[in-house]
Image (tube, grey):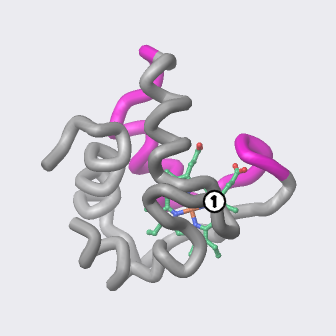
Amino acid sequence: MLKLFKNKICLGCHQVDAKRVGPSFNMVREKYQQDSEMTADILATRIRSGGSGVWGALRMPPQPKVSQEEAFLMAQWILGKGE
Ligand code: HEC
């Protein structure tokens, strides 16, 4: 799975356990584990479309090279529901 993140250049801005440009994936997991409304589907869409304002002023650019299927796998992993 980390290979997919690396191939998709996510790791240029995110690390699993340390804040970089964007929040660490562990921080994202902690935040949304409290939030029963957050599903891997919603997070996958946010990964693809990018966003801002949730974690600070910096914006995450859209990721058009990531398919919905890949984004879903990554979202599941981040949320701790995948492999
Ligand atoms: C250019 C830097 C950059 C890249 C590349 C990047 N991100 Fe981000 N990401 C950010 C920033 C900055 C935020 C915080 C946005 C915010 O505050 O809403 C973020 C937020 C997130 C979030 C939390 C979204 C939310 O709504 O809480 C997830 C999940 C995420 N990124 C996953 C990924 C994945 C997976 C990839 C690779 C496909 C990726 N990011 C690539 C900068 C980046």
Between 80 and 39, the one lying in front of the other is 80
Between 66 and 13, the one lying in front of the other is 13
Left or right: residue 10 versus residue 80 is right
The residue depicted at 56 percent of the width and 59 percent of the height is 18
Residue 62 % position (x, y): 58, 68
Q: Quadrant of the N terminus?
A: bottom left
Magenta residues, as a range? Answer: 36-56
* Residue 54, above or below 17: above
Left or right: residue 63 versus residue 3 is right
Left or right: residue 45 versus residue 66 is right
Residue 28 falls inside the magenta stretch? no
* Residue 11, above or below 28: below
Residue type at mark 1? Lys
Residue 35 % position (x, y): 50, 18
The residue depicted at 50 percent of the width and 71 percent of the height is 63
Furthest residue in direction right, as rendered: 57
Residue 49 falls inside the magenta stretch? yes
Q: What residue is disc 1 on?
A: 19
**For residue 61, what is the image quadrant?**
bottom right
The residue depicted at 43 percent of the width and 15 percent of the height is 36
Between 18 and 56, the one lying in front of the other is 18
